[in-house]
Image: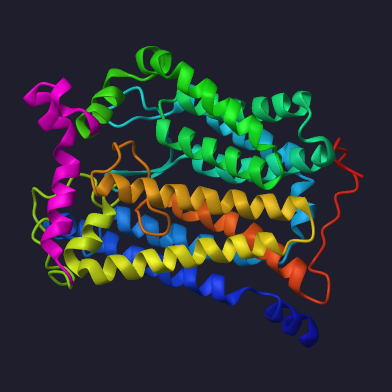
Amino acid sequence: MGNRIKNGIRGTDFLLYLTCIVTSAFGCLMVYSATRNDALEAGRFMDTECLVMILASAAGIVFCLIISFIDYNSIVRLWPVIGAVCLLLIIALFKWGEAPADRPNARCWLTIFQIGDRKVTFQPSELAKVGFLVTFSAHLDRVRNEINKIKNVALLTFHALIPIGLIILTDDLGSAIIFGFMFIGMMFAAGLHLRYFAIAGGAFAAAAPLLWTKFLSNFHRQRILAIYYPQALSQSVYNTRIYQQQRAVDAIGSGGFFGDGLFKGTYTQSAAGIPVNESDMVFSVVGEELGFIGGFLLLAALAFIILRIIHTGKESHNLTGAVICYGTAFMIAVQVLMNIGMCLKLLPCIGITLPFISAGGSSGLCVYLALGLVMSIYRFNHSSPEPENFSYSLLMTPFGE
């Protein structure tokens, strides 16, 4: 028993694990600061958003460690079950999904239960990202020696378009974009020829006018124009669409090099502060209260996490482990770039959270599920003894040996 514990400790990637825990703790502190004013006005020490984030992150940290002890190859063999559960949850949104008041078509959340006057919701697209890592890596492993055949490229693309299409229909464009980049990253890691990427890029460019007029809603078009071509909008529409991002930029700029101090940000602690600064605009809280130094240290921690995951993928003994790691790295990296781009008014605001930092129980929990897979891959490739192996001998899949 003692040797098993020692072997388990030895095979754990504590460098990645502890960095993620510290980053999540920092995120909880930032969300607490962002919601502190509302909580105090309501006579509470902590806002529900912050409480849910702490509980979800704590659960994710535990699940991450548990998953890391399970051979990831055994988990991947369960791809039909995992894929079916994720698809059913997304399909459930069309009947039971809930949307914010300002975007009634964005039915992206399912209500789990209610705490006081606040509903605790779950966003299936976050779990679907983890499910996609599993199902798509299984598919790639199946065709690994013939990935560049047109038939296989078409089937892999169709595989990715199933969740992307369903998520687009729920009006969750941000999550759909993340899925798209995960698909590109995993295909590239699996060895797809560059000519396919060039063809896809050309097709996307040719279809851009049609996508702009028929695919994007007026709301999304206005947010894009507000950043890149504000002259096309009336002053009132422009002011409405850019307000959130302009306030975020002003807050970040006011923080200067060292920041105004924790819980002392003028914009963050104002009753009329930055909309959704506990989630989409959480980087504005970091920039205002902790300044350039705080923002830089946060980006350094996130960059380390991404590079550590890529390193684990490079050392994987099989394609399945490699593409899971690269897909996870792309998922986190794209969300970081897009979220901070939104906060700096460089990219349009499309509702993408900052991993480990933004409020949101779904994202806080599910990113750790993906990290559990990465840590299992690390353990499987670095430990002398085999990790705990759960056999699914009764489950027949076309990806079995």
Q: Position of residue 151 (x, y in %)?
A: 77, 23
Which quadrant: the N terminus?
Answer: bottom right
Between residue 264 and residue 237, name the one nearer to us.
Answer: 237
Figure colour scheme = rainbow
Q: Is residue 218 above or below residue 292?
A: above
Q: Residue at x 36, y 20 (%)?
A: 216
Between residue 314 and residue 329, name the one nearer to us.
Answer: 314
Q: Is residue 51 left or right of residue 71?
A: left
Q: Position of residue 161 (x, y in %)?
A: 59, 26
Q: Which residues are magenta?
A: 228-257
Chief SS of the magenta region: helix
Q: Position of residue 384 (x, y in %)?
A: 82, 77
Q: Is residue 22 left or right of residue 296?
A: right
Q: Is residue 211 above or below residue 271?
A: above
Which quadrant: the C terminus?
Answer: top right
One can see residue 102 in this view? no
- Find residue 50 and report its image quarter: bottom left
Q: Residue at x 53, y 40 (%)?
A: 181
Between residue 177 and residue 41, name the one nearer to us.
Answer: 177
Q: Is residue 65 above or below residue 203?
A: below
One can see residue 197 in this view? yes
Q: Is residue 155 magenta?
A: no
Q: Is residue 72 above or below residue 89?
A: below
Q: Position of residue 281 (x, y in %)?
A: 26, 49
Q: Residue at x 29, y 38 (%)?
A: 349
Toward the bottom, the furthest residue is: 2
Between residue 366 and residue 332, name the one nearer to us.
Answer: 332
